[in-house]
Image: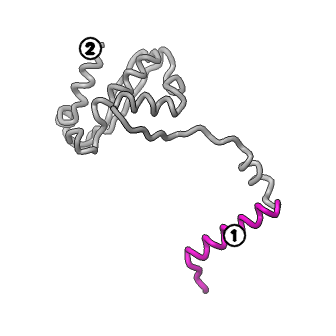
Amino acid sequence: MDHISRRNFLKTATLTGAALGLSGTLPRWVKGVLAQPPLPPDLAVVKGAPEAAVRKAVELLGGISKFVKSGDKVVLKPNASFANTPDWGSTTTPEVLTAVAKLCLEAGAKRILVMDNPLRASESCREKTGLGKACEALAQR
């Protein structure tokens, strides 16, 4: 059995696709897919201060009203599995959690629950990540 290298396979597939496209012999379903309007993004990458970045990212995804309606009960699942401080980058920062919760409240959320399944003792995770204090502050609103 002859083996084809990855490079040759990709080269052949690309040239074949280009030849079919230029010759107008693409199958109808491929033409239909290519003619569809682009889908809205489902990922946004934004840099900056946490609250401003969260607001901009949610705006790029279609706005908070795309996800939360007035009267909704919302569950936020931060990444709080590890008892690490936010500077480790392994957990959601309290500022990001707070910014998302604020957006939900602004959209009219009736109730917000913050839930996770930590891999370590939950009390330690809440304390070291700072998410416990963030939730307490949100509860005071």
Camera-side residue: 34 or 113? Answer: 34
Q: Residues within 10 Å of mark 2 (few under 14, many from 20)?
A: few
* Placement of the N terminus among the 4 image quadrants: bottom right
Q: Position of residue 84 (x, y in %)?
A: 20, 42
- Please report the bounds of the magenta region as a residue range: 1-24
Q: Position of residue 103 (x, y in %)?
A: 42, 22
Residue carrying label 1: 15
Is the Cβ of the residue at disc 1 closer than 8 Å to that at disc 2?
A: no
* Residue 140's disc number: 2
Residue 92 is drawn in which quadrant?
A: top left
Residue 102 is drawn in which quadrant?
A: top left
* Residue 97's disc number: none
| Gap between marks 1 and 2 measured at Cα | 62 Å
Q: Earlier in the sequence, mark 1 or mark 2?
A: 1
Q: Which secondary structure, mark 2?
A: loop
The residue under the point 82% across, 63% down is 23
The residue under the point 33% across, 32% down is 49
Q: Position of residue 2 (x, y in %)?
A: 61, 85
